[in-house]
């Protein structure tokens, strides 16, 4: 599936580097050619020889190998020729230090040099892996934002057990997952220009993640939505040429490249942000899991506990999707999601009609691999007029592609 693709893998010095010989093996088995670049610190975690043997190629670290300093016949311009050679540049694991060096354009070893000499437009995939607190540190998030803005696709680390013994966000995805992300990136890159740029000139407004409804200054009501589906849609829409505004509840996901992101907290905040962009958008996709209720009044400070039963009075939040469906002009498209357990299709059709939608994306809550927090989804698309399309389990990124593709078919009808 990666037949003949040339991949430069940059390995930096995190514990997850020990998984890289396995990644190289999988890439080779998929038909790719792989050249491995290591930072000096990476060799603390994985033997260079293991990477040389699995890749079948010399592993490079310094820009100028010691021997080449005295011998001009040796290849001392590999930092450029490899940038020309590569179809994709992958950094896994990417440590804080490597993220910082890439974000600031340093060029002090082979990994950073190839990043800079990579030919324009080639996919750059970055997989940070570190302790959760380090990942969330403002400086690291700032560097990730910079890299996204520079056209890198930065993948959020996974949640789970970390080398420190702590549990949190920071794990490098398994090699199989990384191979799949590389494959998807190269497939998109290789797609015909016309197919990729179908959203040029369109403004797409997307909601993502969970809202938080305050109980008091330290507590809130929310849900498990991670924002992954909405972020995948935003990333794909931007790649397909759209101007994208992403209104998101609290999430640790990095901002996709070329996407304008607005962070909000509550359903009311989300509605306000959506209203300020809705009239100028061509497509509105409500992927957020908006809380249906909020406390009638948020208490100031912190509510003290007592032995008495505590009643929390809840009121409905605004239905953002419903309001947009009612307000839309004939040229606008409004797309909603439905998470259903029983009578899934009937309920989804009911929502499509009640909210005046053009398309509804049905997720089944009770199927393994679909729903909140995971990277995969099982979707069914029901269009206005009733046409239905069912898809098997796929990554949220692939699902985003299917959804955007289906929406784009309305462009010809309108
Ligand atoms: N939605 C919204 N504003 C709300 C609630 C939901 O924009 N206050 C949007 C969601 O983003 C999603 C769709 O509406 O696109 C979900 O519809 P909803 O009626 O909330 O259905 P579910 O939550 O799926 O299910 P239920 O009807 O059982 O609550």
Image (tube, rainbow, N blue to C red):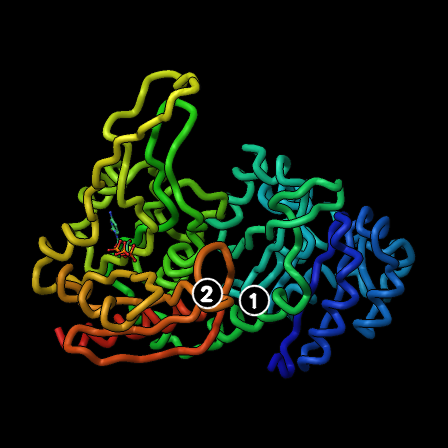
Q: Position of residue 287 (x, y in %)?
A: 33, 56
Residue 401 coordinates in the image, percent (x, y) = 39, 70
* Residue drawn at 80 percent across, 51 percent down: 42
Q: Answer with left or right where residue 314 lies relative to residue 150.
A: left
Between 240 and 334, the one nearer to me in the picture = 334
| Mark 1 Cα-neighbour bin, 10 Å: few <14, some 14–19, many ≥20 | some
Q: Is residue 230 depicted above or below 167 in this figure?
A: below
The N terminus lies in quadrant: bottom right
Residue 20 is at least partly visible in this image: yes
Q: Report the front residue among 340 and 371.
A: 340
For the residues labelled 2 and 1, the Cα–Cα distance comes to 18 Å
CB at disc 2 and ligand 1 closer than 8 Å: no
Disc 1 under 8 Å from ligand 1? The reply is: no
- Asked if disc 2 and disc 1 are in contact, CB closer than 8 Å, the reply is no
* Comes first in the chain, label 2 or label 1: 1
| Relative to 147, residue 182 above or below | below
On the rendering, which quadrant does ligand 1 occupy? bottom left
Residue 333 figure quarter: bottom left
Q: Which residue is mark 1?
A: 181
Q: Position of residue 407 (x, y in %)?
A: 26, 70
| Residue 215 in the image: above or below residue 280 | above
Q: Secondary structure at mark 1?
A: helix
Residue sitting at the far front: 308
Image quarter where the C terminus lies is bottom left
Q: Residues within 10 Å of mark 2 (few under 14, many from 20)?
A: many
- Per the image, label 2 sits on a secondary structure element best described as loop
Choose mark 2 or mark 1, whichever is in front. Answer: 2
Q: Which residue is mark 2?
A: 370
Instruction: Identify the disc placed on residue 303.
Output: none
């Amino acid at each position: 599936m990666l037949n003949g693709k040339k991949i430069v893998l940059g390995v930096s010095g995190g514990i997850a580097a020990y998984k890289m010989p396995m990644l190289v093996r999988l890439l080779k088995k998929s038909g790719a050619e792989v050249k491995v670049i290591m930072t000096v610190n990476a060799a603390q975690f994985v033997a260079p020889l293991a990477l040389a043997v699995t890749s079948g190629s010399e592993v490079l670290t310094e820009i100028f190998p010691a021997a080449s300093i005295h011998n001009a016949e040796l290849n001392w311009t590999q930092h450029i020729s490899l940038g020309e050679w590569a179809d994709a540049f992958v950094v896994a694991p990417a440590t804080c230090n490597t993220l910082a060096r890439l974000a600031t354009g340093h060029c002090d070893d082979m990994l950073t040099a190839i990043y800079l000499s990579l030919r324009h437009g080639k996919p750059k995939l970055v997989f940070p892996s570190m302790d959760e607190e380090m990942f969330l540190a403002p400086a690291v998030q700032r560097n990730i934002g910079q890299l996204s803005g520079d056209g890198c696709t930065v993948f959020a680390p996974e949640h789970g057990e970390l080398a420190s013994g702590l549990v949190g966000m920071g794990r490098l995805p398994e090699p199989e997952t990384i191979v799949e992300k590389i494959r998807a990136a190269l497939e998109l890159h290789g797609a015909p220009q016309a197919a990729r740029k179908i959203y040029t000139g369109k403004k797409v407004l997307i909601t993502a993640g969970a809202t938080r409804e305050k109980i008091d200054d330290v507590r809130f009501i929310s849900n498990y939505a991670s924002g992954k589906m909405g972020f995948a849609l935003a990333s794909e829409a931007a790649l397909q040429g759209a101007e994208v505004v992403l209104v998101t509840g609290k999430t640790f996901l990095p901002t996709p490249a070329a996407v304008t992101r607005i962070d909000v907290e509550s359903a009311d905040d989300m509605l306000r942000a959506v209203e300020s962009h809705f009239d100028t958008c061509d497509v509105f996709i409500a992927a957020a899991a908006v809380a249906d209720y909020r406390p009638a009044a948020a208490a100031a400070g912190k509510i003290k506990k007592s032995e008495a039963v505590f009643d929390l009075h809840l009121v409905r939040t605004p239905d953002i999707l419903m309001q947009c469906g009612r307000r839309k002009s004939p040229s606008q498209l409004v797309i909603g999601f439905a998470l259903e357990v029983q009578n899934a299709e009937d309920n989804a059709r009911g929502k499509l009609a009640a909210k005046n939608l053009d398309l509804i994306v049905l997720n089944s809550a009770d199927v393994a691999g679909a729903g909140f927090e995971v990277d995969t989804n099982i979707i069914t698309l029901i269009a206005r007029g009733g046409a239905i399309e069912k898809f098997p389990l796929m990554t949220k990124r692939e699902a985003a592609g299917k959804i955007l593709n289906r929406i784009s078919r309305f462009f010809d009808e309108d």
